[in-house]
Amino acid sequence: MAKKILSAVALVALWMLLWQLIFIATGSKAWKFAPPLDVVKDLWDGLVPHKVIGELWQEYIQGERPETYSGKVLRGIIASLIRVLYGYGIALVLGVIVGLLLVSSRFFEWLLGPLILGIQSLPSICWLPLAILWFGLGENAILFVVLMGSLGSITIATRDGLRQVPVTYQRVAATFGAAPMQRMLWVNVPAALPVFISGLKQGWSFAWRSLLAGELLYRSISAGSLLMDARELNDYPRMFAVMIMIVLVSILIDRILFAKLEARIHARWGLAK
């Protein structure tokens, strides 16, 4: 554990050093590439919901309530996570249902197979105009973009995972008298989990990117709105701070949730390296 922490600290220090060298090398254009210490300060201000003495003075002594940046990144990231979990959850339920239909029926495969493949290959940004026309600029439009961005990956992962289950497993289960529904629930679904989990991870990454694309168009408490505010103010340290936080959240979710789940399933099925 200590080695991993030291390795992570060394990696961050190396990237900070390279960042500072690039900032110095840019010369007169340095204002377009914020120094790392300024970004770290903005990131700290955006994550920690604190108030400095000047803000307290304005609020309690002068009767003003200034717009403060303190804690905004934290609030924006939490709001974005709630949105993406909502949309991703709906995509998960619909994707599994459609995937099961594709496997169980040739008619549904003929009817929906090409459509799902097209949805998977279509960039999520393409759904924004349709979402705005159908739902307007609001939460429902963002939810729709997240749903369509991740639905294809989950559906295809469900279909391919079930199709790759060895026929021997089903024959053995049938020999022991298992009914078709029992074979599906207790044989096919567990055997398809390694492929299914990989599809879930891919669907999550698509959902996260789709969410941020939608939030760039709609003013709300969100990571996307923070990026737009920083762009309009030409605030490069804040822009880089929000971008770094978005990347960190994506990495943490992958390492804490999907990587551990994938490793556990691979170990359960004897696929661990």
Image (tube, rainbow, N blue to C red):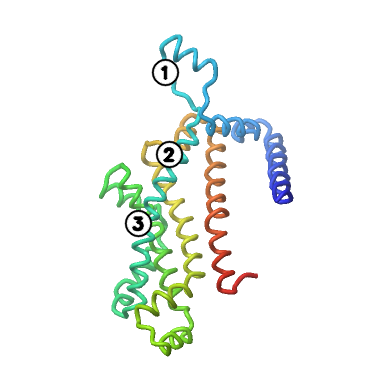
Disc with the residue nearer the chain's start (3 vs 2): 3
Relative to 128, 196 lies left or right = right
Q: Earlier in the sequence, mark 1 or mark 2?
A: 1
Q: Residue at x 53, y 50 (%)?
A: 250
Residue 35: x percent and y percent? 65, 33
Q: In this view, does 168 lie above or below 248?
A: below
Residue lying at 55% horizontally and 64% vertically, measured from the top left: 262
Amino acid carrying label 2: it is Ser
The numbered disc on residue 222 is: 2
- Residue occupying the point 30% across, 75% down: 108
Label 2 neighbour load within 10 Å: few <14, some 14-19, many 20+: many
Give the CA distance from mark 3 to mark 2. Answer: 20 Å
> Would you name the residue on which mark 1 appears?
65
Residue type at numbered disc 3: Ile
Seen as rendered, the residue at the extreme top is: 61
Residue drawn 40% across the image and 52% down it? 125
Question: Residue 148, position in %: x, y?
Answer: 36, 57
* Quadrant where the image shows the C terminus: bottom right
What amino acid does circle 1 point to? Answer: Arg
Q: Nearer the viewer, mark 3 or mark 2?
A: 3
Q: Name which quarter of the figure residue 188 lies in.
A: bottom left
Question: Marks 1 and 2: CB-CB under 8 Å?
Answer: no
**Residue to which mark 3 is pinned:** 90
**Label 1 vs label 2: CA separation?**
21 Å
Numbered label attached to residue 224: none
Badge 1 element: loop
| Residue 82 lies in quadrant | top left
Relative to 125, 70 lies left or right: right
| Structural distance between the alpha carbons of marks 3 and 1 | 39 Å
- Residue 116 versus residue 198: which sits nearer the camera? 198
